[in-house]
Image (tube, helix red, strand yellow):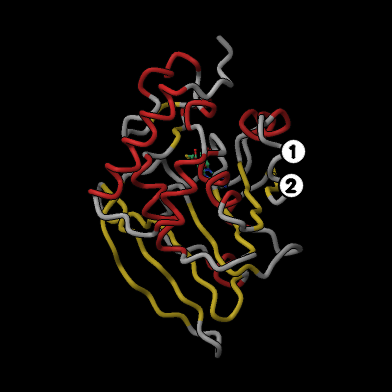
Amino acid sequence: MSKFEDTYRHKGLRKKLIDLLREKGITDERVLQAMNAIPRHFFLDSAFDEIAYEDRAFPIQEGQTISQPYTVAYQTQLLQLAPYNKVLEIGTGSIYQATVLAEMGATVYTIERQKKLFEQSKKFVFRDKYPNLKFFYGDGYEGLPTFGPFDKVIITAAAPFIPPKLVEQLKPGGKMVVPVTEGELQRMLRITKMADGTCTQEAFDNFSFVPMLTGKND
Ligand code: SAH
């Protein structure tokens, strides 16, 4: 069977995962609907087919991970997407999180520093379905100054600090959701840029991400 088949069994397991996310406290129905529409097993090696709908992170190539569904739902909910928002994502990885944002109608600019992972986006199975999803190879700390400013920024790797250039690339009224390292874990923060350019900060739960590294890796 091709990996790119979404069977009744997959759909059933996915529905259960969505119910679990709701039980865990995710309330934004648009987020839950988008995740219910996207076959997560398409984003994983076929060896994970049986467990793709468990609420767990899994390894992808280059020692990286696909985020846990709860984490994807949590970060996406905190972004408070509005129609046609322009979103910058740092850490394309498996493309799953970026696809959730694209499914919700955002225009998504996603950056990956691992060349091999970036190359995979060229054969992304949903390339035609989401013309609003654009892939970049580069260092996320730099952002994409020529494509900004952005309504929203989402960082999906553990940031040692809030990257200043990404704050610069936020529109007034824009928000950034970023897991910032505090000891062993990361604290999820939401930065809001005010009309006068100053920022406010809210703190949420702790999570565990792979590190946000500097520079590109060919
Ligand atoms: N959003 C991804 C999560 C992947 S894990 C998903 O849904 O699967 C985090 C990713 O961030 C890894 O692929 C890692 O290579 C990438 N990353 C780490 N530091 C980065 C940086 N400075 N710029 C861009 N990508 C980075």
Q: Is residue 8 left or right of residue 120?
A: left
The N terminus appears in which quarter of the rendering? Answer: top right
Residue closer to the observer: 57 or 38 = 38
Q: Is residue 175 left or right of residue 132?
A: left
Q: Position of residue 13 (x, y in %)?
A: 36, 29
Task: Give the quarter of the image for residue 99.
Answer: top right
Q: Residue furthest front?
A: 8
The residue that label 2 is drawn on is 131
Is the C-beta separation of discs 1 and 2 under 8 Å? Answer: yes
> Could you tell me which secondary element the residue under label 2 belongs to?
loop
Q: Position of residue 71 (x, y in %)?
A: 36, 47
Q: Residue at x 44, y 13 (%)?
A: 47
Residue 188 drawn above or below residue 3: below
> Could you tell me which secondary element the residue under label 1 belongs to?
loop
Q: Amino acid at mark 2?
A: Pro
The residue that label 1 is drawn on is 128
Counting the numbered discs, the total is 2
The C terminus appears in which quarter of the rendering? Answer: top right
Residue 91 drawn above or below residue 9: below
Q: Residue furthest top?
A: 1
Residue 58 drawn above or below residue 103: above
Residue closer to the observer: 26 or 202 = 26
Q: Position of residue 213 (x, y in %)?
A: 50, 45
Q: Say whether mark 1 is within 8 Å of ligand 1.
A: no
Q: Amino acid at mark 1?
A: Asp
Q: Position of residue 87 (x, y in %)?
A: 60, 60
Q: Residue at x 63, y 67 (%)?
A: 150
